[in-house]
Image: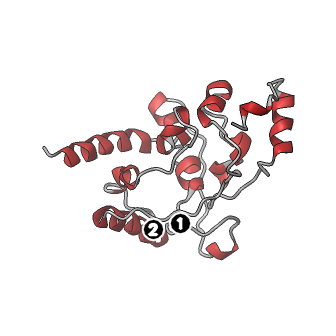
Amino acid sequence: MTKRGGRVGVGVAVAVSIAVPAAAQTGQPAATVKAPVISDTGRLKGPRQPIFFRHDVHAGQDQVPCLYCHSTATVSSEPGIPAIQTCFGCHQMIGGSTPSHQAEIKKVREAWVNKQPPRWVRVHALPGFVRFPHMRHIKVLGTDSCFNCHGDVRAMPQVYQVATLKMGWCVTCHLQRNVSRDCTLCHY
């Protein structure tokens, strides 16, 4: 087996286990969440992306954990945009339930074949003089804390910025949690 083939094989195994909702894996009844069909993406909040990645489908309906795709958030300052290999790991088997989903999945497959990752438009950005160590926040707040800053992406067809991410907003969060407000925590 080639190195690339081995990684794809592992990706398939992980994709199958992730694609089955977490509730089904634990034997618990799943909360049925069905993402709506969207035919007009022009009215959605947030920047248009090269692939219409539906967070409400992946994180909401299918219950894929944030850290499956944004795995580096626990060990890095940056949460990272998933490699196209992560997307392809699932979508070499999962084809989409509607023509619009199938069209977007086709873009994923083409990106994989052409070895050209999509040029995603950044949604959340901080000034260059601010450091936000994701790993530190996840360690303290837990792996389900992403919604504190990013909003409930499980209900967002297209991700948009919910919080201002300005200094006052961050200081308020630190005050509410009785966390240090030492300038060198974020400005170093």
Residue type at tag 1: Phe
Residue type at tag 2: Glu
Label 1: state its secondary structure: loop
CB-based contact (under 8 Å), mark 1 and mark 2? yes
* Total tally of numbered discs in the picture: 2
Q: Which x, y percent locates residue 110?
A: 34, 68
Q: Tell me the quadrant of the picture where the N terminus can be found.
A: top left
Q: Name the residue under label 1.
A: 52
Label 2: state its secondary structure: helix
Disc 2 crowd, CA 10 A, few/some/many (<14, 14-19, 20+): some
Gap in angstroms between the C-alphas marked 1 and 2: 6 Å
Q: Which x, y percent locates residue 73?
A: 55, 38
Q: Is residue 2 left or right of residue 8?
A: left
Q: Which residue is drawn at 60% across and 41% down?
A: 31
Disc 1 crowd, CA 10 A, few/some/many (<14, 14-19, 20+): some
Q: In this view, does 80 lie to the left or right of 84?
A: right
- Quarter of the image for residue 158 reads bottom right
Pick the residue in front: 6 or 173.
173
Picture colour scheme: secondary structure
Q: Residue at x 59, y 57 (%)?
A: 35
Q: Which residue is drawn at 63% across and 29% down?
A: 136
Q: Which of marks 1 and 2 is nearer the N terminus?
A: 1
Q: Name the residue under label 2.
A: 104
Looking at this rendering, what residue extends furthest in the left direction? 1
Which label is found at residue 120? none
Q: Which x, y percent locates residue 167?
A: 82, 44
Q: Residue at x 80, y 28 (%)?
A: 182
Q: Which x, y percent locates residue 147?
A: 69, 42
In the rendered image, the vertical position of residue 106 relative to residue 23, given as above or below: below
Pick the residue in front: 4 or 62.
4
Q: Tell me the quadrant of the picture where the C terminus can be found.
A: top right
